[in-house]
């Protein structure tokens, strides 16, 4: 059971940029598309759009469009997406504890 749950979670978060996008939204709250582009300079516009659509489809990210010219589009984490933040903090703490040289010691 646990393995299938982990597999489903990883499927939602797979992709080179999804976790990076989530971390930026977690850190800064609401971001416009252009702000995300500037925050992640190595991602192409096409890839950013695709990753955001996937995250929106899976209920992690909310997209808000304002009826302005030019259109204003903002992204933020949904309540469910924000619930992931303690797990992300734990992941960062775990990564920070990596032994020097990359090999665990007993």
Image (cartoon, rainbow, N blue to C red):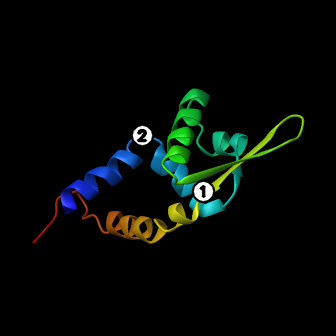
Q: Residues within 10 Å of mark 1 (few under 14, many from 20)?
A: some
Q: Residue furthest left?
A: 106
On the image, the x and y values in percent for residue 80 come to 51, 64
Give the numbered dot on residue 71. none
Viewer-nearest residue: 98 or 44: 44
Q: Residue at x 65, y 60 (%)?
A: 28
Viewer-nearest residue: 42 or 48: 48
* Rendered position, 58 above or below 79: above
Helix, strand or loop under label 1: helix
Q: Residue furthest right?
A: 69
Please give the residue where the numbered disc 1 appears in the rendered image: 25
Left or right: 55, with 27 as reference point = left
Left or right: 70, with 5 as reference point = right
Please give the residue where the numbered disc 2 appears in the rendered image: 16
Q: Residue at x 48, y 48 (%)?
A: 58
Residue 5 appears in which quarter of the rendering?
bottom left
């Amino acid at each position: 059971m646990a393995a299938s749950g982990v597999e489903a979670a990883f499927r939602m978060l797979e992709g080179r940029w999804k976790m990076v996008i989530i971390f930026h939204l977690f850190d800064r709250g609401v971001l416009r598309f252009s702000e995300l582009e500037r925050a992640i300079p190595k991602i192409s516009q096409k890839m950013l759009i695709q990753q955001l659509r996937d995250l929106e489809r899976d209920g992690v990210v909310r997209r808000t469009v304002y009826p302005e010219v030019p259109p204003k589009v903002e992204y933020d984490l949904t309540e469910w997406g924000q619930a992931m933040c303690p797990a992300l903090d734990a992941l960062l703490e775990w990564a920070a504890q990596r032994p020097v040289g990359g090999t665990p010691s007993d």
